[in-house]
Amino acid sequence: MGSRTVLVEDLMERFPHVPREAVFKEDLLRGGVAFDPSALSDNEGGEVKPKSYFIFSFDHGTLPELGEAALRRPPEEIILTGGPYDLRRTVVSVRVNPASPYRVAADDEGLLGLYLDGKRIADVGVPPMPEYYRHTLSNGKSVMEVAPTIQWGYLIYLTVFRVCQYFGAKEECQYCDINHNWRQHKAAGRPYTGVKDVEEVLEALEIIDRYDTAKASTAYTLTGGAITKTVAGRDEADFYGQYAKAIEERFPGRWIGKVVAQALPKADVQRFKDYGVQIYHPNFEVWDRRLFELYCPGKERYVGRDEWHRRILDSAEVFGARNVIPNFVAGVEMAEPFGFTTVDEAIASTTEGLRFFMSHGITPRFTTWCPEPTTPLGKANPQGAPLEYHIRLLEAYRATMDDFGLSSPPGYGPPGPGRAVFSVSSFMDSLPARDAVEV
């Protein structure tokens, strides 16, 4: 067996309470996966739902470095099942890395599988092209460009502002490639709308609603870059809020409305609520004070870590604690040259943050860090954080939730191994498979 297989099996043995599916999922998310040409899509003209690049690149190379995967996009997500580890159904967001020890390829019978160190370890399912992707807006734009869906169709991801006003080395978050992702898609001649028109969004949602007859799409997320000044004459709360207001007026109650924005003052947060948003994600990014100041210089300069946290707690008075779900980027705690040098230290710090928020009834969630190569932390840490960190984080996350009597947050679909659809980390895969109340 190759060294990666040995490492993964050792971690599964050492942490038996973490689902084995989550061990593989975290490794794929942190380190990426290679794609044989037999496993690539035919873009929007094929039978497989292609990767939409819905906000960040989530790749371990720039488009010119991805080879054929830049021309024929890989699938948006993959599903792992079966194999020698008898994996339950596991949805994984695709992060392309041509150098990964994991590879998706078709066998002699044309059946896709996931290979590790040359050994087939799971069957691979790919998302079928949804009917709503086959229809265009009246102006010719694709639904995938305006309102892509992820999490196996559960979530409509509305990145309505494709760049961030924290700009340059002194303001951009050091792990974030939103601005580069915008630049690379424009350089490649791909359609990549900077500011999405409200009516375009509504038209795309009408197409989804018409053709999503199974009602698989259950929630939408409004998001984009931070707004420090204005966009089209609107501040951040009004800019993102205008979309929620229009959606809720046109499609009352059709989807759970979520917004990812900065930690805003309470009066601005109230505007989100008044516009019809149901869940608020004021992401705190990384818990440690020194690392927040170093890795999120724009957020530290404009708001500051202490004020950011105060605003998160204040927002619970508007939305209710259960509906405030701040994200952090799991793994940047260990990024060189400033991060923690041991897994013990990193887990202790992150758990401190989890306990702080969960003691107030607020349940954070996390995205597994993908070290994109155009970011400062990605360049310095191409391997990301150790897999052990990610596995122990899942253990600590569930234990902290249990300590405070909390259950899986709303707006993420069902929890539990074999059931979860949240694709950019394994936190939902690692929680008990109980039925969750959505809101």
Image (cartoon, rainbow, N blue to C red):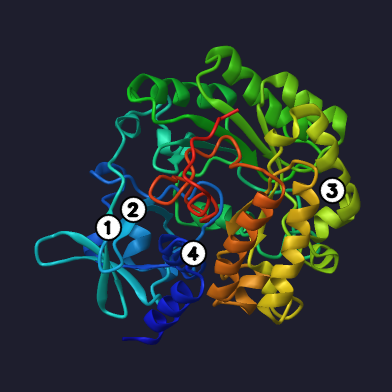
How far apart are the alpha carbons under marks 3 and 4? 27 Å
How far apart are the alpha carbons under marks 2 and 4? 14 Å
How far apart are the alpha carbons under marks 1 and 2? 5 Å
Q: For numbered disc 4, what is the local secondary structure?
A: helix
In the image, which disc is placed on residue 326?
none
Q: Quadrant of residue 235?
A: top right
Dots 1 and 2: beta carbons under 8 Å? yes
How far apart are the alpha carbons under marks 4 and 1? 16 Å
Q: Is residue 201 left or right of residue 119?
A: right
Disc 4 crowd, CA 10 A, few/some/many (<14, 14-19, 20+)? many
Q: Is residue 249 left or right of residue 202?
A: right
Q: Quadrant of residue 45?
A: top left
Q: Which residue is mark 1?
A: 124
Q: Is residue 190 left or right of residue 124?
A: right
Tell me the quadrant of the picture where the N terminus can be found.
bottom left
Instruction: Identify which residue is drawn at 56% across, 74% down.
Output: 388
- Looking at this view, is 352 or 296 the one in front? 352
- Is residue 290 visible in this depiction of the protein? yes
How far apart are the alpha carbons under marks 3 and 2? 36 Å
Q: Is residue 121 above or below residue 135?
A: below
How far apart are the alpha carbons under marks 3 and 1? 41 Å
- Looking at this view, is 52 or 79 the one in front? 79
Tell me the quadrant of the picture where the C terminus can be found.
top right
- Is residue 233 visible in this depiction of the protein? no
Rendering coords of residue 41 (x, y %): 28, 53
Give the residue type that dot 2 points to. Ile
Q: State which tag comes first along the sequence, 3 or 4.
A: 4
Q: Is residue 4 above or below residue 77?
A: below
- Looking at this view, is 77 or 64 the one in front? 77
Rendering coords of residue 189 (x, y %): 45, 51
Give the residue type that dot 4 points to. Glu
